[in-house]
């Protein structure tokens, strides 16, 4: 595969720089598009012209849009940084930077209209001209009281605070974790919100209290609304008898569901058989769109949720359980509606023919990953399963063809990042008893790959099918890596003596070869972590630019409609085309589809944030009892306030601030790859091993803090773990507040921001965003399907 096509911003920048219309060939040359990808670029340019991002002129020439006489107003969601500035993500437009003074009365999470006022090194800049819709009015935080005044300090530092409490706080004590509902939003930049206290959650620092606060902040509700539940129950009663009319009858195909042992919902089933010319594969996916109808209560709630969220102790499903675990789930020996990709592959696993059909099926058996691995002889760990043994021949056919698919995918340049994942172990009281690196039996991992390869194949073939029919769709796109971040990765590689060519690293195949080269390097984890930060986040978009990480020209999500909304939308589009409808390319349809894609991306980011933060919370809660212990770890990141150290056992990340690095003053080196003591020359570099003592834990910041132990202190590795009396405030789960200053009233009765609380004294740069994801419990704990969720 050639490198992915340039994205919307790169094409627009090229045309704006030219200042005139350019032929598609000239655009290809300036954007570095290879000749084999020219036709795909031309298709992309026509898509951008159709949606109004660029202008199409005669002779395959394209130009930047004409500037309006007045500044253009865009509408989007505003994301506010703790330091006061914000960004607005407008549908189909590049993000716009909004300085603090230009936010007006907008809060983090509001939908606003912005006026683009100019450009700078940050890109487009603008100001908020209108607030179209307010964010969820509920905010989690800590109650503060002083005499008769009461206010809530938001935990989410992106939300303007403090929030002046007008009612509901009389029973709350100073320091209680609580939720307030904003009743009066600020109207200008110098006003603060006002509201009422609606819930007192308990003592800050308790696991369930903190998880509840996170969910409220991200507007996540576990229970589905009554209308959606009632609708799902009516469907369950009405759909007991299925009809094969208008569908391909696949009930004789010996489909297998292969899932974790504790899986509750089964959204895919697979089968493969040898043919005269190769192999025929069947990939059946639950037909959720048959039940979740567009515009219904179920559909509206699914769109709002976006995806299922997996926490260490439970899952928060996108669909009600009566659908997710029963009516839509491909249970064995139960007839189910499905969407199925049927593909004929030759001896080299190249697709010769495929079709997408509506079907009716009946899974032959439900097999676990472990039992499949045991049957295939990949491992001896799980017990033998008679059911898996009965389908040994079928499993071998699946293993053979998917092995070829995987080798072909790696050959074309797909990235193979094997990043560590945290697994939180909880007791019956949901308290963390350990945090470990998730162990992966190599044999079981191979069976995960069998299913993964078939899901990737189905997603690519459906994307190709929709593209051939010129139908708008929600694609899963992944742009080229950030060049500046790649340069930093190159600098680290060079210091470690690893060859690094920047130009080849911007092509999937070159990057894949480099990953293979470092596979056995002792600093592999650090290098892969830096690479991960160089890669852009995959998102949903209706403009297909390809998927860099998968080295794919066209990719979308089709295989998990039970737990991802974009998959459900793709199913609807397919069914409309199969039933004779023409692709809807109207402006209204494109805008609605683009809005759904933008919402899905936002919901996914929110889900990832919650999953990641809850794991970080449990890590901090576990480390609270380790204050005073000596540990050893690897420097994984250098930030403006210190270093992050990754510890293998327990599997936690620890922040060591500058002033705790040693008896010296430390600064980042010019290349930002080391911390250097100004007097001693003591150097701490990425990938170094350091010994430290856990010094403190901030539950509210989900952060463990450490103090480096130097050789001058008489500590040498290897060492025996030592302990001392734990820090009192760390064990209480929060830093003690040394200042409690209430909100200040202005002459007009409005409020200004009070002094920041002690919990927020550390720089926002200290907060690490880790790449690990939490242990997934029911319905699919640790399922490979969850790891596929982020492709």
Image (tube, rainbow, N blue to C red):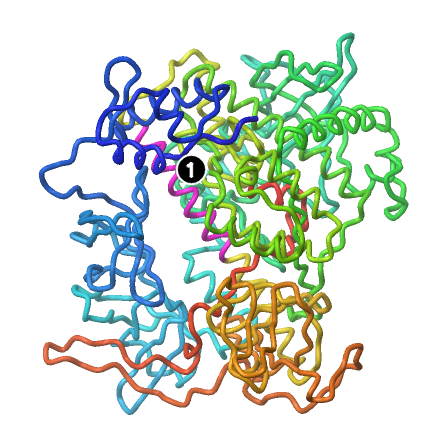
Closest to the observer, 767 or 744:
767
Q: Position of residue 89 (x, y in %)?
A: 32, 47
For residue 59, which quarter of the picture?
top left
- Rendered position, 131 above or below 767: above
Q: Position of residue 94 (x, y in %)?
A: 32, 43
Query: Image quarter for residue 198?
Result: bottom left
Q: Quadrant of the N terminus?
A: top right
Which quadrant is the C terminus positioned in? Answer: top right
What is the span of residues highlighted in magenta in the rendered image? 590-609
Classify 117 as above or below 376: below
As for residue 593 lying within the magenta part, the answer is: yes
Residue in the foreground of this view, choosing between 252 and 739: 739
Q: How many numbered circles does the render carry?
A: 1
Residue at (17, 49) in percent of width and height: 117
Magenta portion: prevailing SS class: helix
Magenta stretch contains residue 784: no
Q: Position of residue 201 (x, y in %)?
A: 46, 73
Element under disc 1: helix
- In the displayed structure image, the side of residue 88 where residue 567 appears, left or right: right
Q: Which residue lies under the disc numbered 1?
A: 299
**Point 59% across, 30% down: residue:** 286
Crowding near pointer 1: few (<14 within 10 Å), some, many (20+)? many
Q: Residue furthest top?
A: 276
Residue located 42% across and 37% down the image: 299
The part of the image, by quadrant, that contains residue 157 is bottom left
């Amino acid at each position: 595969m050639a490198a992915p096509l340039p994205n919307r911003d790169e094409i627009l920048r090229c045309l704006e720089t030219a200042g005139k219309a350019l032929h598609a060939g000239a655009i290809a040359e300036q954007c570095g598009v290879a000749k084999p990808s020219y036709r795909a670029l031309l298709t992309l340019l026509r898509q951008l012209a159709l949606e109004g991002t660029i202008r199409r002129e005669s002779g395959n020439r394209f130009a930047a849009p004409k500037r309006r006489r007045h500044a253009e107003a865009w509408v989007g969601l505003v994301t506010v940084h703790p330091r006061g500035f914000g960004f607005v993500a407008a549908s189909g437009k590049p993000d716009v930077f909004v300085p603090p003074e230009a936010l007006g009365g907008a809060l983090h999470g509001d939908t606003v209209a912005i006026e683009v006022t100019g450009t700078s090194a940050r890109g487009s800049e603008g100001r908020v001209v209108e607030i179209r819709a307010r964010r969820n009015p509920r905010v989690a935080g800590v109650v503060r009281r002083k005499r008769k005044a009461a206010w809530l300090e938001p935990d989410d530092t992106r939300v303007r605070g403090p929030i002046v409490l007008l009612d509901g706080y009389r029973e709350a004590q100073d320091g209680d974790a609580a939720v307030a509902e904003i009743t009066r939003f600020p109207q200008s930049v110098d006003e603060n919100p006002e509201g009422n206290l609606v819930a007192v959650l308990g003592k800050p620092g308790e696991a369930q209290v903190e998880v509840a606060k996170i969910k409220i902040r991200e507007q996540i509700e576990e229970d589905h609304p009554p209308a959606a539940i009632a609708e799902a129950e009516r469907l369950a009663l009405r759909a007991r008898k299925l009809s094969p009319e208008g569908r391909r009858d696949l009930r004789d195909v010996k489909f297998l569901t292969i899932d974790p042992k504790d899986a509750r919902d089964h959204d895919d089933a697979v089968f493969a058989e040898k043919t005269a010319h190769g192999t025929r594969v069947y990939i059946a996916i639950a037909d959720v769109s048959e039940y979740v109808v567009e515009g219904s209560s179920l559909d509206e709630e699914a769109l709002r949720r976006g995806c299922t969220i997996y926490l260490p102790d439970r899952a928060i499903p996108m669909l009600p359980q009566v659908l997710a675990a029963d009516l839509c789930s491909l249970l064995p020996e139960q007839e189910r509606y499905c969407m199925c990709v049927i593909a004929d592959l030759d001896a080299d696993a190249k697709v010769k023919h495929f079709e997408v059909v509506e079907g009716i099926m009946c899974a032959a058996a439900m097999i676990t990953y472990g039992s499949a691995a045991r049957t295939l002889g990949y491992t001896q760990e799980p017990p033998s399963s008679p059911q898996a043994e009965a389908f040994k021949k079928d499993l071998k056919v699946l293993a053979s063809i998917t092995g070829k698919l995987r080798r072909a995918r790696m050959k074309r340049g797909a990235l193979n990042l094997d990043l560590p994942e945290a697994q939180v172990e909880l007791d019956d009281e949901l308290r963390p008893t350990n945090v470990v690196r998730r162990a992966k039996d190599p044999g079981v991992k191979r069976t995960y790959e069998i299913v993964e390869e078939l899901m990737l194949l189905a997603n690519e073939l459906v994307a190709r099918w929709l593209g051939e029919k010129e139908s708008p769709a929600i694609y899963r796109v992944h742009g080229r890596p950030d060049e500046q971040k790649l340069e930093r990765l190159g600098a680290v590689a060079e210091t470690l003596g690893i060859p690094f060519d920047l130009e080849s690293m911007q092509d999937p195949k070159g990057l894949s070869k480099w990953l293979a080269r470092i596979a056995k390097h002792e600093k592999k984890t650090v290098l892969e972590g830096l690479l991960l930060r160089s890669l852009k986040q995959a998102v949903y978009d209706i403009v297909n630019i390809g998927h860099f990480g998968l080295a794919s020209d066209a990719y979308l999500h089709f295989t998990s409609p039970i737990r991802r909304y974009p998959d459900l939308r793709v199913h609807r589009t397919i069914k409309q085309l199969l039933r004779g409808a023409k692709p809807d390319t109207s402006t209204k349809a494109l805008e609605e589809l683009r809005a759904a894609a933008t919402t899905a991306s936002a919901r996914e980011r929110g889900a990832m944030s919650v999953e990641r933060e809850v794991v970080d919370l449990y890590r901090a809660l576990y480390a609270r009892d380790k204050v005073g212990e000596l540990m050893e770890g690897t420097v994984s990141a250098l930030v403006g306030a210190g270093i992050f150290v990754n510890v293998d056992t327990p599997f936690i990340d620890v922040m060591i601030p500058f002033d705790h690095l040693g008896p010296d003053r430390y600064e980042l080196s010019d290349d930002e790859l080391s911390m250097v003591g100004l007097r001693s020359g003591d150097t701490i570099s990425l990938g170094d091993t350091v010994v430290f003592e856990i010094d403190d834990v901030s539950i509210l910041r989900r952060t463990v803090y450490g103090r480096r132990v130097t050789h001058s202190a008489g500590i040498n590795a290897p060492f025996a773990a030592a302990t001392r009396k734990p820090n009192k405030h760390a064990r209480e789960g929060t830093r003690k507040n040394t200042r409690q200053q209430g909100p200040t009233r202005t002459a007009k009765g409005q409020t200004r921001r009070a002094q920041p609380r002690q919990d927020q004294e550390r720089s926002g740069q200290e907060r690490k965003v880790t790449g690990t994801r939490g242990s997934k419990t029911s319905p699919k704990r640790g399922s490979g399907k969850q790891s596929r969720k982020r492709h």
